[in-house]
Image: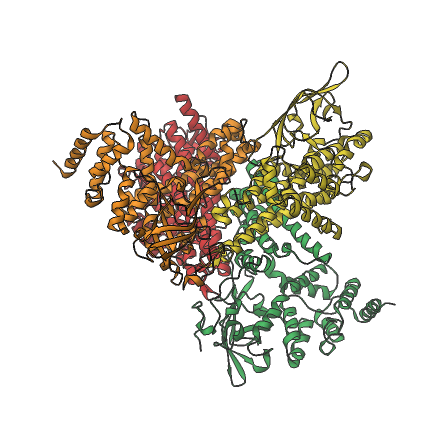
Chain colours: A orange, B green, C yellow, D red
Amino acid sequence: MSEHAAIHAEVTQWLSQHWDPDMDLLSWRSLVADSGWGAPNWPSDYYGKDLSPQQTAVVEQAFAEFGAVGAAQSGVRMLAAVTLLAHGSHEQKQKYLRGILTGEDQWCQLFSEPGSGSDLAGATTRADLRGDQWIVNGQKVWNTSAHHAQYGLLLARTNWDAPKHQGLTYFVINMEQPGVEVRQLAQMNGHASFNEVFMTDAVVSREDLVGAEGGGWQCAMTTLANERRSFDRARDVAGRKGRQGKIFADLEAEFAIANEPYTWYPQRAGRVDLVMPRAKETGAINDPATRQDIARLHIMAECAKWTGDRAKAAAKAGKPQGPEGSLGKLAASNVARLASRVHTAISGNDALLTGQTSPMDGLIAEILVSTPAISIAGGTDEIQKNIIAERVLGLPKEPRFDDGPFRDVRRNTQAPSEG
Amino acid sequence: MSEHAAIHAEVTQWLSQHWDPDMDLLSWRSLVADSGWGAPNWPSDYYGKDLSPQQTAVVEQAFAEFGAVGAAQSGVRMLAAVTLLAHGSHEQKQKYLRGILTGEDQWCQLFSEPGSGSDLAGATTRADLRGDQWIVNGQKVWNTSAHHAQYGLLLARTNWDAPKHQGLTYFVINMEQPGVEVRQLAQMNGHASFNEVFMTDAVVSREDLVGAEGGGWQCAMTTLANERRSFDRARDVAGRKGRQGKIFADLEAEFAIANEPYTWYPQRAGRVDLVMPRAKETGAINDPATRQDIARLHIMAECAKWTGDRAKAAAKAGKPQGPEGSLGKLAASNVARLASRVHTAISGNDALLTGQTSPMDGLIAEILVSTPAISIAGGTDEIQKNIIAERVLGLPKEPRFDDGPFRDVRRNTQAPSEG
Amino acid sequence: MALAFTADQDQFRDSIQRFMTDKMPTTEVRRLMAATRGFDDETWRQVSDQLALPGIHIPEEFGGAGFGAVELSIACEEMGRGLFCGPFFSSAVLSAYALLLTGDEGQLDHWLADLASGTRRGCLAITEHSTLWQEGDINTLAKADSDGQIRLRGNKRFVIDGQTADLFIVAARSESGIGLYLIPDHDPQLGITPLDTMDPTRKMADLHLDDVPAIQLTHQPEHLLQTLLNVACICLANEMVGGAQQLLQSALDYTQLRFQFGRSIASFQAIKHRLADLLLEVELARSAAYQAAQTLAACENLRSLSPSQANKLTEHASLAKAAASETYLQAGLETIQLHGGIGFTWENDTHLWFKRAKSSEVLFGSPAEHRERMLTAIEDAATTTEDAA
Amino acid sequence: MALAFTADQDQFRDSIQRFMTDKMPTTEVRRLMAATRGFDDETWRQVSDQLALPGIHIPEEFGGAGFGAVELSIACEEMGRGLFCGPFFSSAVLSAYALLLTGDEGQLDHWLADLASGTRRGCLAITEHSTLWQEGDINTLAKADSDGQIRLRGNKRFVIDGQTADLFIVAARSESGIGLYLIPDHDPQLGITPLDTMDPTRKMADLHLDDVPAIQLTHQPEHLLQTLLNVACICLANEMVGGAQQLLQSALDYTQLRFQFGRSIASFQAIKHRLADLLLEVELARSAAYQAAQTLAACENLRSLSPSQANKLTEHASLAKAAASETYLQAGLETIQLHGGIGFTWENDTHLWFKRAKSSEVLFGSPAEHRERMLTAIEDAATTTEDAA
């Protein structure tokens, strides 16, 4: 019997011995974590089994077929694990990885700042070594789920004389301390998906410095490189909804919390799916001018979808990635912007309504006040176009004005004064 | 009797003594030039009468009322005169100004080069002093009426170690010499409004250096500053068409030649005036989607017109110029681009036809192949937007990469090798 | 037609700007938009007494300042720039013009003076389904009951400031056609439902009229509803241009202040060019709004417009409405985008203008509807001149 | 549906690219477009014999290579990229599909093989007034004369390569409805008027049929003209995408080569962003063209399409035509603009593609017409599925 079949059998055997949907989620995941089946691709010293990605896929397959819940993986947790496994010390791995797999600990990312959005490496949150402790001062922003996180992945400046990328250091910070204040950040569409985090003489022990002092940028790159993947995981979890047993109830509760910041994302994308139904409902489908706009939107949305399909097909056929792979985000911005226009044309005055008498319970209005976010969040259209122009088309890079010692780089003033 | 009335009387008196519509144009203009009434605002040493602009307006008024033809002024001639009056030597003024007023001499402008279009100061046509002569080598382009000009206003580089603006010198070059070859430059719309001028060891005498060596940029600025005004003159001439007498026949002939390069300019601007008639003629006016485009065009064109009116009204009321004064060219590009689309939508397949069966004798097709020029000629939209952003909105200038010695500035390779 | 303002008009504008800066900072806008009432009585009193704005365009004989449509449009532009929260547009623009068009001497003496002084706040109720105020869309009925009292029955939608007005002017149908009717005050038969909209800076309400006693306004001039719509569009267009200008200014300020990669983001050419494009948009829309105001000002008697006057007024009103709507929305989108993440937050002020842009876009008809309306007016003008020839 | 090409298809594309680079440089394009005939017999022979392109999609039993719509669309794309001058589109695409749709065994044996081998060059004459090939637009009549010979009478417009074809397929009306008729060769009754157009790289002619004897093509499948229009639009869309790609490439090459102010103009951010936008445009249109070709390839029998197949084919054909038209035009305008003055000259090659873009934009219907046609197809699909349910 093949090696994969053997692994599949071993996992299934283990599950049949231990799986009990009436356990609470935490106890079950503790079992899973300690068994090594929760992250089989991790090293055996750290809750793993040194398995290859292919073998790991077999394990996940076995869990899925058995209908059993795996380790906690969704969200920033995974980013923390991947980064710690790549750059963390032995002690850090021992201290943090288990709580990640069991789901006991929530993590958040503390990278972006009011003064450094597109320019992440321009962070001015400072960490100064006083005796055995790093003292952190500064403000971070766009921190999803920071309001119920135990730990934060912190990017802070420890050297103001080095060039911007070399002066940053990566820390694990305990969010539950007096020096750390988390405030929810309300958006123009009424939701609050993000937080601001204010650090005033917050304390980080020397042991929680990840990687090398001044090596923070490399660690941050590892974190960001895995961002997309982690959200795919979140969807997997969603796939398991609706099953019976306490464990699934716990799982749904966990997922509901994890997903809460994202409920308006479909509206942010423009809800192209609602255009034809609304057009028929309102009769706008009979207006020739509106029909042209509806058609334009349909064309743009279909072309964007097919462009993504081409990228997938090329990857599947083992071809080198063409430009089609880098255009999705920009296309999505254009689609959402046009969709917002079309929904406005279709609903007219009613598009403004948010109360009981409003169409689709205010959903249309939510589209209009949410679409402006899609061309900003996760990299503005401007940054996307720079990337496409420079990396895909190979055009010259922007001239640099921020090399040399960071303390001499012109920047926004809302950052704390330099030491 | 007021001073202005006196001038008016004096001019009218002079005209009643000398004016004869059956004279040939040249003889008449020679009379006018020598009388000083041809350019009364010029110094009395040089065919003028030292009159003020207001007084000069009275003279022109008197000529107009009398129905008499004035001195030759249209086109590049006037630019030459203004530049020579401002920067030329006594000998140059004596030598060239009369031929300008009589119309004996045609002039052309030799500024732009294949390698320096938007970047005029990047000219690489070189002039080297050999004994008493400047030897000129290089290529110029976009030279209107160079193919029948006696003299050229030449901008050439005489110093390759100075920064780009300081290494240029301004010359008068005799176009009728073996070293100068003029080729007409055909456009994508079939017209040929411009020339290329190739100079191979062309000769310019030391006396024909205008202003100071290395002072060419200032002279060129004087020339360009007067460009618009000269074309207004051209229109004045047009106003006098259709009168009887040899002199008017000569005048019309002269104007026909002068105007020949510009016959397609109305099509370049999109012929908004033809949109409604064509839409009714074709029935496109009944198509709701096309109506939206026609309306969009009407709105854009009216707004552009009114924006110009606001600028004029503000100037008339003696108010400081607002942004409305700097937007006309950019607006005209947008109008022409949209007009071309609308004409295409209105005429459909027929828009392509250029033969006998074509709508309006190929005029519609000419619009489609001419509008692309309007956002390029006389300063591209990109340059316009830089100017608006930097001078009107006060935004930061582009970082410079072309200061320092010109020989070290990166540039196009089609330029002749440096000395 | 003079497209430059006089020194007096410039001074008038400055005085409003000073007032807005002083009395209507966004802190105040946020306070008022959060309240159901939506405006501050003291501020309204000052607008009425110090600036005399509600009567700026109303003849002196009826207690106004006796200026014209140009001065009114200046006021609208500055209120749009500062997001003025108050019943100016509903009362001074819509209701006052409705009375001017339809009231007889007595009615003007009685009611218009109150609007001019700001002591009463009128609202205008016309829209039922279509937003272009077509006569065929008016199904509210005006009937005299047994004792000769006229009563109104029907429903009106999107009535600006309907929830706080104390004078209601309603379009209704009777045997003699479409006319305007005045409800002098609140009435048990008058149901008022405030609307929740995405733009809390402009309050709107639905009206339910259940045999509400009303006074018929005497005159029913030709083109009544279309002339009112033209006035509404012209004043709104000027308000929108003010808002677009404010957005452009804040985009210019922020991009020059904001440093990324060691340089202000306003130094990036792509952003410079987009700001240049936006300036062009705003100046073009401004020209349309100013021209439309001039065209309105040139109509010496709105009650009897010549066919060519009526067509030109409609052409320019719809042109200005369409142009200003597209520009204001574009300015809103660009300004949010150029602010980046912060521009999408509630604490940043940009969304206040963006939402006003969205609500203005669809109010009184969409840009597409007004492009069509404009073109029809142009065609009508052509045919009438042909008939004349 | 696989949106990636096989290794064979990539090789096939390379071979055409090599041929075009070798045989169709712009010097040759300029030579041929200046001649009335518009193509070179030797080059056409090589396209037919070496590459076997005219029969690429024709079943082997009729002398073709037996490949499908995807291979055909690859050929169209590469010919669009290189501005191929020759009767490929008129003969191999339009005429061959016309025969495939309507010919009986004998007719296919007789005529299709000649088109596959390139020994005959067919043209397709359908358009009279509307460009969307509506049956109601066909007024050319097919009547049998006294001795039973069918004769065609009417006028056809914008017939691609009509002046050089030696086989004419004409849509005409008879008692039995709209069918296709074949004129095997030139005929004194057949008047051919070459058209002067702004795009000399694609020759077109008007036909005047004055009782021209013709052969009736046997079959009249449902959706005949609409299916032909769909094929035409899908192949043209792929041709346009090839042209747009060529324009984008030349814009990229030129802006990186061109130095102003001491830097390549491709280093200016405003230009970088516009090139990024143009890349997006081109890739989106490419996806539409490729998808439409896949949809065509998925129709196993074009003579009997299910309602859902017919609707999907129409939806994707019109979608691709509209998307590619807008993109090709945009690419032409941007590429001229980014070349500056030189881009407007005759000696610069950009205008060759720009003019092809303009002529392709209106050929077989405008983008607006195809957006409407696409939406109608979507609605029809919805209703038919509802009926099914």
Tell me the quadrant of the picture where the C terminus of chain B can be found: bottom left
Where is residue A57? Give x, y as percent: 23, 39
Q: How many marks?
A: 0
Where is residue C15? Give x, y as percent: 71, 49
- Looking at the image, can residue D209 be seen? no
Tell me the quadrant of the picture where the N terminus of chain B can be found: bottom right
Q: Is residue B25 above or below residue D2?
A: below
Where is residue B101? Give x, y as percent: 69, 72
Where is residue D323? Give x, y as percent: 44, 42
Question: In the figure, is residue C167 to the left or right of D187?
Answer: right
Question: In the figure, is residue B199 to the left or right of D6?
Answer: right
Please name whichever residue, D261 or D114, is drawn nearer the observer in this view of the structure. Answer: D261
Please name whichever residue, B179 or D276, is drawn nearer the observer in this view of the structure. Answer: D276
- Furthest toward the top, the residue is C146
- Looking at the image, can residue C294 be seen? yes
Please name whichever residue, D336 or D230, is drawn nearer the observer in this view of the structure. Answer: D336
Tell me where residue B82 sits by quadrant.
bottom right
Please name whichever residue, D245 or A24, is drawn nearer the observer in this view of the structure. Answer: A24
- Furthest toward the bottom, the residue is B131
- Furthest toward the front, the residue is A131
- Furthest toward the right, the residue is B1
